[in-house]
Image: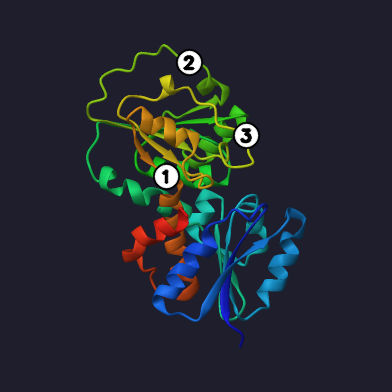
Amino acid sequence: MTQAYAEVIGDPIAQSKSPAIHRFWLAKLGIDADYRACHVLPEDLADYIARRRGDQSWRGCNVTMPHKQTVMALLDAIDPAAAMIGAVNTVVRSADGLLTGHNTDAAGFLEPLRADLVQPHLYRMARIIGAGGAARAIVSALAAQGFTLVVAARDPGKARALLDELAPSGEHHAVALSQFAAPTDFAFDDRAGLYDLVVNASPLGMAGHDPLVLDFSHVPPGSTVYEIVTNPRETPLLAEARRRGFTTVDGLAMLIGQAAAAFEKFFGVPAPRAYDTELRALLSE
């Protein structure tokens, strides 16, 4: 048998940091395997899955934009968590060629927030920008953690449908993305005991995409500003949030967290997280 491998697929894919992450861990553990990137156009997705299904060396793939939902119909089974979210970011091939879809985005997103989430809060609110595949995982994860959600999208109807599907209970709100672009004179009340998140769950601000236009008058005092974009690592959103003194979480946090969960599914051993500082330095070069 040729060398075992996994890969990441998407359109585009050249910007993906996943090969660097998984190869770093494989080297640290001395595992004779590889992890690659494969550019798959939407019209080629079914053929790609059919070809890989018969490849005994292929352990599976991570799935990024725009395939996280469309890939589901091509698989043999969907993990219950992924089925609930309605998006797959990890496909695992069993020894007999059966393909199962998982979602590690939700766990990866929550990982850097765990220390805060174990604390009691009077109220939790998250403002989420985006209504695509990544947003689905984030909405599902935060709803389960007791957040009231405000989802902003170019099409507020899509945001409303996402909330109705994934977080049907609770007083959640769908708004137009443009609402966050214009200044507001809203006076935030005392935030003591409250936990506020502002999350960019969209590709806005990513290299090659439109910028994210967010007026910081919509960001409550004491918020944590969380960016899932990784290219560039220091997005304008993060730079401005840090300049204003907000706590920030960069896109590498979620990327590494979800990759670790996928790595164990592909290669059967936990990712060596003791080297996270070294890995982050590598990814920042």
Please name the amino acid that badge 1 sits on. Asp
User: Position of 6 compared to 219: left or right?
Assistant: right
Q: Is residue 17 above or below residue 237?
A: below
The amino acid type found where label 3 is placed reads Asp
Numbered circle sitting on residue 198: none
Where residue 24 sits: x, y (%)?
45, 68
Question: Is 277 left or right of 260, judged from the image as shown?
Answer: left
CA gap, disc 2 to disc 3?
20 Å
User: Counting residues from the N terminus, which is met first, the one under dot 1 or under dot 3?
Assistant: 3
Residue 183: image tag: 2
Residue tagged 1 = 250
Helix, strand, or loop for circle 2? loop
Residue furthest to the right in view is 43
User: Can you identify the residue that label 3 sits on?
Assistant: 210
- Mark 1–mark 3 CB contact (< 8 Å): no
Quadrant of residue 206 within the rendered picture: top right
Instruction: Give the mark nearer the N terminus: 1 vs 2.
Output: 2
Determine the residue positioned at 47% across, 33% down. Answer: 237
Residue 283, position in %: x, y?
Answer: 46, 56
Question: In the rendered structure, which disc, 2 or 3, sits on the residue that comes first in sequence?
Answer: 2
